[in-house]
Image (spheres, rainbow, N blue to C red):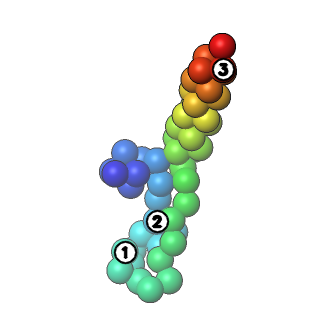
C-alpha cells in the first residue's frame, strides 16, 4: 500500500528482491504521518473533555 501510494520507496529499486532491500519514507509519506499524528492528537484532546 505505502509503495503504491507513493508514501515509501525502495532504497534499491532495481533489485526489489534483494536481501539488502530497505525502504524509506518519501516527502509525501512524512507529510501523511505528520497529518495522522495531528489528527490523533486532536481526537485525544476531544476525548479528554
Give me the residue at 55% from left, 34% from top: 36
Asked if marks 1 and 2 touch (Cβ < 8 Å), the reply is: yes
Report the residue at 42% width, 69% height from top.
13
Crowding at mark 1 (Cα within 10 Å: few <14, some 14-19, many 20+):
few
Residue 37 is left or right of residue 23, and the answer is: right
User: Which quarter of the picture shows residue 18?
Assistant: bottom left
Q: Position of residue 39 (x, y in %)?
A: 57, 26
Q: Mark 1 sits on what residue?
A: 16
Label 3 crowd (10 A; few <14 / some 14-19 / many >=20): few
Q: Which residue occupies the extreme bottom position in the image?
A: 19
| Image spot of residue 38 (x, y percent) | 63, 28
Decide which of tag 3 and tag 2 comes sooner along the chain. 2
Viewed as shown, does residue 21 lie left or right of 43? left
Q: Pick whichever, 24 or 14, lies toward us.
A: 24
> In this orientation, does residue 46 appear?
yes
Marks 3 and 2, how far apart at CA: 40 Å
Q: Nearer the viewer, mark 3 or mark 2?
A: 3
Upstream in sequence: badge 1 or badge 2: 2
Residue 10 x/y as whole percent: 46, 65
Q: Nearer the viewer, mark 3 or mark 1?
A: 3
Answer above or below: position of 35 versus 4: above
Residue pictured at 34% horizontal, 51% vertical:
1
Q: CA distance from mark 3 to mark 1?
A: 45 Å
Instruction: Give above or below for 33 relative to 43.
Output: below
How many C-alpha atoms fall within 10 Å of the one at disc 2: few (<14), some, or many (≥20)? some
Residue 10: mark in rendering: 2
28 is higher (above) or lower (below) than 14? above
Residue 7 horizontal/vertical position (percent): 46, 47
Task: Tell me the residue that label 3 is attached to.
Answer: 48
Q: In the displayed structure, does residue 14 sit left or right of residue 31?
A: left
> Element at badge 2?
strand
Amino acid at each position: 500500500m505505502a509503495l503504491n501510494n507513493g508514501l515509501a520507496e525502495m532504497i534499491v529499486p532495481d533489485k526489489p528482491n534483494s536481501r539488502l532491500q530497505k525502504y524509506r519514507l518519501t516527502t509525501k509519506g512524512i507529510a501523511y504521518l505528520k497529518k495522522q499524528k495531528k489528527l490523533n492528537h486532536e481526537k485525544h484532546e476531544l476525548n479528554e473533555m
